[in-house]
Amino acid sequence: MPTSPITDLDTLDQIYGPAIPSSVDKVVDHITPLYRQWIEAARFAILTTVGPEGTDASPRGDVEPVLRVADPGTLLLPDWRGNNRIDSLRNIVRDPRVSLLFLVPGCNNVVRVNGRAIVTADPDMLDSFDQNGQHPRTVIVISVEEAYFQCAKALMRSRLWSRGDESDSVPTAGAFIRARDDGFDAEGYDTGYADYARDRMW
């Protein structure tokens, strides 16, 4: 373990030097038409929040765009059915700062949005996200403060979209549960989860 952590910004600046000007100049304070085009192509995003207990990152996905661009300054993210931990929502209620990372399959760039959010259960808002008669319990309303694209190096290094299916190399969800409960039927859980989830997606 490191024994000499960096504890001041001057030391960091000496190590890294100044930011590349284009990495700062590219930041905008609203959703431009090009950013809207990207976001509306994204079916998957990562939502990050912060609260008194710490930070949280939550995957968000949908069969259509993962959220709705209401206007250049506002994004609407429905909160569909999950496990009711609602860590992200608990954080937002107490600290509105949020970030979003949008990924599009096959694209090595990503788009990042930073802003502040509220959680609403407004009936008209919920109804507007109808999915075959199902509605989210709440909607996260995000006020955009920054939007910018991230350079492609991270996804290029990882070859995220070109290495194929690597799922055989990692534990399954059932294996994670069985690690805490020796008697748990991990195989049954894993093979049956897709059928279980099919009618519980929204």
Image (cartoon, rainbow, N blue to C red):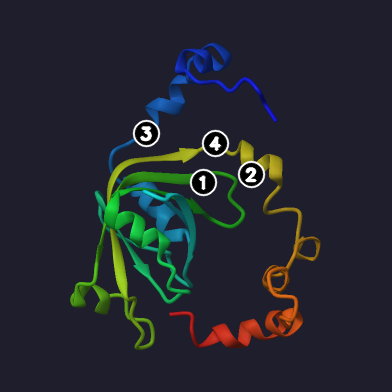
Q: Do the residues labelled 4 and 3 touch (CB within 8 Å)?
A: no
Q: Mark 3 points at which residue?
A: 27
Mark 4 falls on what kind of element? loop
Q: From the viewer's side, name the closer residue of 152 and 10.
A: 10
Q: Front-most of 16 and 24?
A: 16
Q: Can you identify the residue that label 4 sits on?
A: 151
Q: In which quarter of the image is the N terminus?
A: top right
For marks 1 and 2, the one nearer the N-term is 1
The residue type indicated by label 1 comes to Val
| Mark 3, secondary structure of its residue | loop
Q: Nearer the N terminus, badge 4 or badge 1?
A: 1
Residue tagged 2: 155
For the residues labelled 4 and 2, the Cα–Cα distance comes to 9 Å
**Residue extending furthest right?**
169
Q: What element carries label 1?
A: strand
Residue at numbered disc 1? 110
Mark 4 touching mark 2, by CB under 8 A?
no
- Would you place residue 69 above or below residue 100 in this image? below
